[in-house]
Image (cartoon, rainbow, N blue to C red):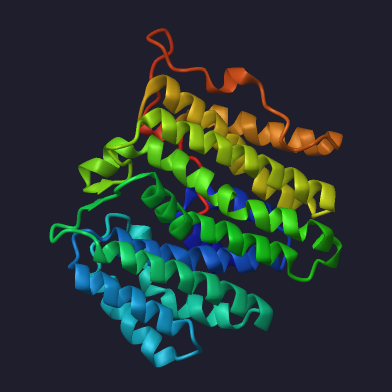
Amino acid sequence: MADLEDLLLRTSRTFALSIPLLPEPTRREVTLAYLLFRVADTFEDATGWERAARIAALERLAELLDGPDPAAAEEEAQRWSAEVPCEQPGYRELLAELPAVLDDFFALAPAAVETVRRHTRRTIEGMAGFVARTSDGGELALADLADLQLYCYTVAGIVGELLTELFLLGRPALARSAAPLRERAAAFGEGLQLVNILKDSASDAAQGRRYLPPAIGRAEVLALARRDLAAAAEYANELQRGGAERGIVAFSALPIHLAHATLDRVEAAGPGSKLSRPEVYAIVQHVHRTLDRGEPVMTPPPTTLATPETPETPAKTAAERAPVPLLR
């Protein structure tokens, strides 16, 4: 587990914040699922790589999930870690360590392996479809609101569904909550993804990723994100009412609280706005205090946490900021 957590730290400060809250075996299952999705994301985001090569890598990754093949995994890992253009050193290290990740993945309980495999393959297939739509220069432009929602479902809504099935696995006490959780799972993922798209719209566009369709107004996307986050809040509260372990409730609630605060910040201050580390820490503490008191976990934190930065409040440096946890 130590090696997996090291990879987690090197590839996501955000999931490294929330995954350790989970109980075992869910913690290990979600860690491995995240790392496999991160490999797929790395291929999807490699706009400096040929379109055909990105699609082929996604398809080959899906094949590697079918069953243990150490020799094939080692061969592909060596090639991908050398060829795939990516700015994050941690992503390249993850590609090199893919055989070990796959070994640990196949060592999970059979039901968990099948759950993670099925949902990861669904996302990989959807990602390949969007990569196929990119220009020769690697640019992707979404057409309308339905297209944006389809993209969010592909890269994050399916993750919400995957997490739900892992939460339900081996927890018969949650059976009564299964239907409402599944009903809200995709909105949970979509809401978090929309917040990140709004936050990162300027930097994404500079890299050829135009997720915000020009035909729809920013206010419409903000409104959709808020509706999704309301459904996500109901999701977290349902987990709590259903008797899920504290770690599962905290894992689910924390990114929703952070997303709400970030959305307020972005709406007030524009793309690129983020929460400071002290603000993130305050929200983390709010979630734990709420659980300590036995209150509904999605009670709102103090509104001052997301007050827009003003000339009287100096802008934070990059080192002082922390991104919103993603389900991606």
| Residue 66 appearing in the image | yes
Residue 320 horizontal side relative to residue 232, left or right: left
Residue 2 horizontal side relative to residue 83, left or right: right
Q: Residue at x 54, y 67 (%)?
A: 33
Q: Residue furthest left?
A: 136
Q: Residue at x 47, y 74 (%)?
A: 121
Q: Residue at x 70, y 31 (%)?
A: 286
* Figure disc tally: 0
Q: Is residue 125 above or below residue 143?
A: below
Q: Quadrant of the N terminus?
A: bottom right
Q: Is residue 28 above or below residue 243?
A: below
- Residue 271 percent coordinates (x, y): 35, 30
Q: Nearer the viewer, residue 251 or 55?
A: 55
- Residue 298 percent coordinates (x, y): 71, 36
- Residue 199 percent coordinates (x, y): 39, 35
Q: Is residue 21 above or below residue 98?
A: above
Q: Nearer the viewer, residue 320 or 230?
A: 230
Q: Residue at x 35, y 39 (%)?
A: 200
Q: Nearer the viewer, residue 282 or 149?
A: 149
Residue 238 horizontal side relative to residue 135, left or right: right
Q: Is residue 155 above or below residue 14?
A: below
Q: Nearer the viewer, residue 100 or 175?
A: 175
